[in-house]
Image (cartoon, rainbow, N blue to C red):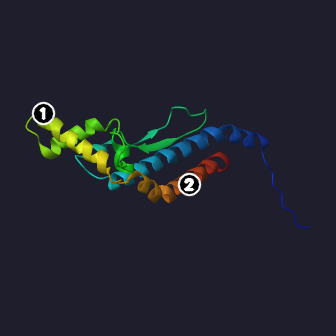
Amino acid sequence: MNTITFTIDADDAIRAFERAHEVMARHVDGALEAGAQYVAREARQRVPKWKNELLNSIRAERVTEAMPPGVMAWQARTGTNYARYVEEGVRPMQSHPPGIANGLMEWVREKFKPENDKELSRIAFAVAFAIQRRGIKPRPYMAPAMEASEARVRQMLRQAARAGIAEVFGGR
């Protein structure tokens, strides 16, 4: 009669399970960071460019606020007050969007090169009125970057999980 003998060293298994959380967290957190960096690169390639302020503000960062213990999260995000208006646009007849004034004044100053502050204010008011009346067409860059990156980010996370499992249970 043929037999197969398989022995599990209980001490080795216990040590592996004790290390599992730290090892898996390290592998998965690294993949989450790499995934967020990947999405940020995709977004930088798709963002409408004007003086590169919005482009240069796109970055990957760890999410720390309001996260339960043990939860790891990274995000690709922008750092300007007008990024949302570029991504989503502004519907006509809405009141002047909060926070757009600074970006609008800067844009007017660069685009029209007014001679003084009075002219700057006049032009900015006219542009703001036109935005209120006609809106701003959306120019999405972040959502398409997320969509284009999803398969690659999932692949990164699968590979990280496999590497963590191999380290915990199969050695290095």
Residue 134 lies left or right of residue 62; in this view the side is left
Name which quarter of the figure residue 46 lies in.
Answer: bottom left
Question: Is 50 rendered above or below residue 5?
Answer: above
Please, what is the three-letter code of the amino acid marked with disc 1? Lys
Q: Identify the residue position indicated by label 2 in the image.
A: 159
Q: Do the residues labelled 2 and 1 touch (CB within 8 Å)?
A: no
Q: Which residue is drawn at 76% across and 39% down?
A: 11
Q: Residue furthest right?
A: 1
Q: Where is residue 23 in the image (x, y as percent from the top left)?
A: 60, 41
Q: Earlier in the sequence, mark 2 or mark 1?
A: 1
Q: Identify the residue position indicated by label 1 in the image.
A: 118
Name which quarter of the figure residue 70 lies in.
Answer: top right
Q: Where is residue 125 in the image (x, y as percent from the top left)?
A: 21, 39
Residue 11 lies left or right of residue 35; in this view the side is right
Residue 22 lies left or right of residue 126; in this view the side is right
Q: Position of residue 47 (x, y in %)?
A: 33, 52
Q: Residue at x 40, y 51 (%)?
A: 142
Along the line of sight, the residue nearer the viewer: 78 or 85: 85
Q: Give the number of the disc on residue 80.
A: none
Question: Is 137 rendered above or below residue 100?
Answer: below
Q: Distance between the residues labelled 2 and 1?
A: 59 Å
Graded by Cα atoms within 10 Å as few (under 14), some (14 to 19) or many (20 or more), the crowding at tag 1 reads few
Residue 141 is at least partly visible in this image: yes
Q: Which residue is drawn at 43% across and 53% down?
A: 143
